[in-house]
């Protein structure tokens, strides 16, 4: 039986747990050098970073512990109708239980509520399960990055209409 999970908006008390998840999961996929989101300033203050207009971050809780998260925000350097699905990471213990799909829908619903019409994602070769999830949820591959995220370590790009 799969563990049950809860998706809720991030709270200030979640910042340390979310930072630890990001710093645990990204190196698992070789994403710990320059040009990856692990080095973004917001990692240590996710609640404040996503308290900005047209932004939201959600956490996945399992048995009272934060085990993953994802958010949406305007795409840096992008068109006003484009958001970015950002910092979607889950600890290995909760992968494959449906939390990723549920989180994706929660984020896309929030993006629609903020008036975005398209959602962009960056990832990298080797994050195969994530790319399969994106494709299942209607994202299509792009040949080149959009906006100016500064994540030059990423080499896979996806977009979907909202």
Image (cartoon, grey):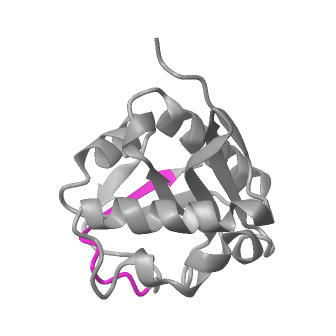
Q: Residue at x 54, y 58 (%)?
A: 119
**155 sits left or right of 84 in the view:** left
Q: Quadrant of residue 39?
A: bottom left
Q: Residue at x 28, y 74 (%)?
A: 144
Report the span colored magenta: 150-160
Quick one: 23 or 102, which is closer to the camera? Answer: 23
Can residue 46 be seen in this snapshot? yes
Q: Is residue 157 magenta?
A: yes
- In the rendered view, tell whether residue 68 sits above or below residue 57: above
List x then y, in percent, for residue 151. Answer: 37, 81
Q: Quadrant of residue 137?
A: top left
Q: Quadrant of residue 31?
A: bottom left
Quick one: 83 or 128, which is closer to the camera? Answer: 128
Can residue 84 be seen in this snapshot? no
List x then y, in percent, for residue 36. Answer: 36, 79
- In the rendered view, tell whether residue 58 sits above or below residue 32: above
Number of numbered discs on residues: 0
Q: Residue furthest left?
A: 126
**8 sits left or right of 155 in the view:** right
Quick one: 153 or 4, which is closer to the camera? Answer: 4
Q: Residue at x 48, y 28 (%)?
A: 98
């Amino acid at each position: 039986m799969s563990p049950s999970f809860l998706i809720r908006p991030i709270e200030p008390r979640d910042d340390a747990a979310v930072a630890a998840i990001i710093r645990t999961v990204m190196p698992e996929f070789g994403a710990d050098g320059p040009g990856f989101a692990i080095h973004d300033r917001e990692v240590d203050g996710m609640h404040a970073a996503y308290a900005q207009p047209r932004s939201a971050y959600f956490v996945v809780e399992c048995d009272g512990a934060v085990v993953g998260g994802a958010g949406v925000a305007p795409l840096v350097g992008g068109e006003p109708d484009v958001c970015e699905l950002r910092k979607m990471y889950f600890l290995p213990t909760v992968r494959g239980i449906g939390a990723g799909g549920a989180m994706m829908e929660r984020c896309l619903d929030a993006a629609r509520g903020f008036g975005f019409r398209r959602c962009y994602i960056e990832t990298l070769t080797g994050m195969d399960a994530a790319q399969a999830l994106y494709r299942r949820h209607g994202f299509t591959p792009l040949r080149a990055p959009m906006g100016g995220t500064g994540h030059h370590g990423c080499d896979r790009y996806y977009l979907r209409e909202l």
